[in-house]
Amino acid sequence: MAADALAELAKRRGFFFGSNGAYGGTAGFYTFGPQGAALKRNVEDAWRDRFTLREGNREIEAPTVMPEAVFEASGHLEGFDDMLVECPECGESHRADHLVEAVTDIEDAEALPGEDVEDLIADNEIACPACGTMLAGEPVEAFNLMFATDIGPGDAQPGYLRPETAQGIFVEFPRLKEYARGNLPFGITQIGPAYRNEISPRGGLLRLREFTQAELEQFIDPEEDEPPLDRVRDVEVRLYPATEQEADDGEYVETTVGEAVDEGVIGSPWVGYYLGVAKEWYDRIGVDTDRFRFRQHLAGERAHYAADCWDAESEVDGDWIEIAGFSYRADYDLSKHDEYGDDAFTVFKRYDEPKTVERATVDPDMSVLGPEFGGEAAAVAEALETLAERDPDAFDGETVEVTVGEGDDAESHAVDVDVADFAIEEVTESGEHITPHVVEPSFGVGRTVQTLLAHAYSEDEVDGESRTYLSLEPEVAPQDAAVFPLVTNDDRLTALADEVAADLRAAGLAVAYDDSGSIGRRYRRQDEVGTPFCVTVDRDGIEGDGPDTVTLRERDSAAQVRIPVADLAEELTALRGDEPFASVAERYDAVDTDVETAGN
């Protein structure tokens, strides 16, 4: 399906469209219409079911604005950049790596140094897409993607809109570990908006300035905790490792999760586990797995926090797009926040048996340090304690050197070892404080929605008439069913149709009601928004001595069965789950589908 056709359908049928159209629009911001908001919500609910509930994890909701100190600690202030090149003629800014990828065979130009991208722009005579001016010789600069803001009035505290939901989880780790009683492993999930000031938003929902992420942060003990890999060992995956991407004749590796982990293609069993879980989940919600792969990040494109990273990618309109990332973040995040923050970002790991160990200690004589170092005495004492833990041999002489302060303010001081009162003591320990490692599956919800729409788009003929329909899985379709009275001039039909719609809604199903136009056209409207089942109330169903019945039509096959009204809610609820329509069709009488075009 062409991108422009999807965009037209999305706008016409209320899936998504550019925001603020009455004021000329705002690039990088999209509004989800009634159909799109429902589809997006169902995708989020399906993700929550799989990655929160079924994994036994807990979900939080953190603020979207956080103080600058958080992002200084996380590394986003210095390392969260894209490559920007500005046109000298019209002043338009562009992603330099995207310009290179558009005219060369290079797939991941963002992994290259800026100087190399400048050379590629010159060598390939790349021009400004807006005005055609040549960009050779223009500098490629790093542009930080975070939106800055002020927290409070006056001398406000600087802050930023969060560029990922993850930091809200990491910052609250000292309290979250208490809820887990300090026991590893445990996982925390979050679904919510994130913000990135993209240089050149494009591709519908693919590259936005405001978007929704669904993220899981799995906290583990790297020495002891292993994932339940056997649950996904036999899941088949298509992998595109870095080695294959860099080879001249590189190709996909078709394998299973278990084999890939055993052979070291996937380095982390935890990452392998979540690749398997994700593959099953994507299949469940309707991603075409023939247009799906896991691609390993090249060394130059990995985020600053990632020891290893794989992307889930889907093919949309001939391009591969990232729809999720799976990172082994090691202890980077918690160590940085432990360094910058005021709380402890460690957990206490209790030994099976207490251990007796030797430990270097100091007990500085403050009656000596005070007069000698004045206001710096406390800092000298703290420096002595740190040095004793790190390098006990430094206390072998008569004096020991410690440094107080940082950078240009750093100052070295000599302290008599006797004053430091250095000693080696035997202590019995019941455990130790460790910094957990983090494994992160991070999903782009909007990108998943666009993938589902692109992969679900289908065309065929029904009763000699061409139609367009979205073959969405019932679990994520915007509506569970639509109810139609066959004609509107029969009060008995309209009354029963109203009653059926109300009963289905009371059963928790999302139901549309449509009594406008021919029945064939009503079917087509529902097909185009992906409604999986249509319920038609006709005279045949209310005449006779038996219970009232209706026809139940399945979207993809257009097959119909006659079903008692009393059974309808239960059957539709089952169909929204795992039950296939074929099993329902076996229990009820088939209906001639000539009604599809009646009245056209």
Image (tube, rainbow, N blue to C red):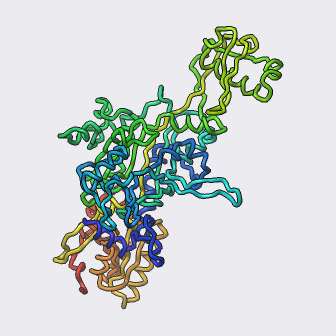
Q: Decide if residue 587 is on the left or right side of residue 79.
A: left
Name the residue at 35% across, 62% down: 203
Q: Position of residue 378 (x, y in %)?
A: 76, 27
| Vertical position of residue 273 compared to residue 578: above or below | above
Q: Position of residue 575 (x, y in %)?
A: 35, 61
| Vertical position of residue 424 compared to residue 134: above or below | above
Q: Position of residue 342 (x, y in %)?
A: 67, 38
Q: Decide if residue 67 is on the left or right side of residue 541.
A: right
Question: Where is the N terminus found, in terms of image quarters?
Answer: bottom left
Q: Nearer the viewer, residue 77 or 262?
A: 77
| Vertical position of residue 120 compared to residue 512: above or below | above
Q: Nearer the viewer, residue 530 or 99?
A: 99
Q: Residue furthest left?
A: 464
Name the residue at 28% across, 52% down: 122
How many numbered discs sit on the rendered protein?
0
| Residue 538 in view | yes
Question: Where is the C terminus found, in terms of image quarters?
Answer: bottom left
Q: Position of residue 385 (x, y in %)?
A: 68, 21
Residue 547 figure quarter: bottom left
Q: Nearer the viewer, residue 8 or 354?
A: 8
Q: Nearer the viewer, residue 525 or 498?
A: 525
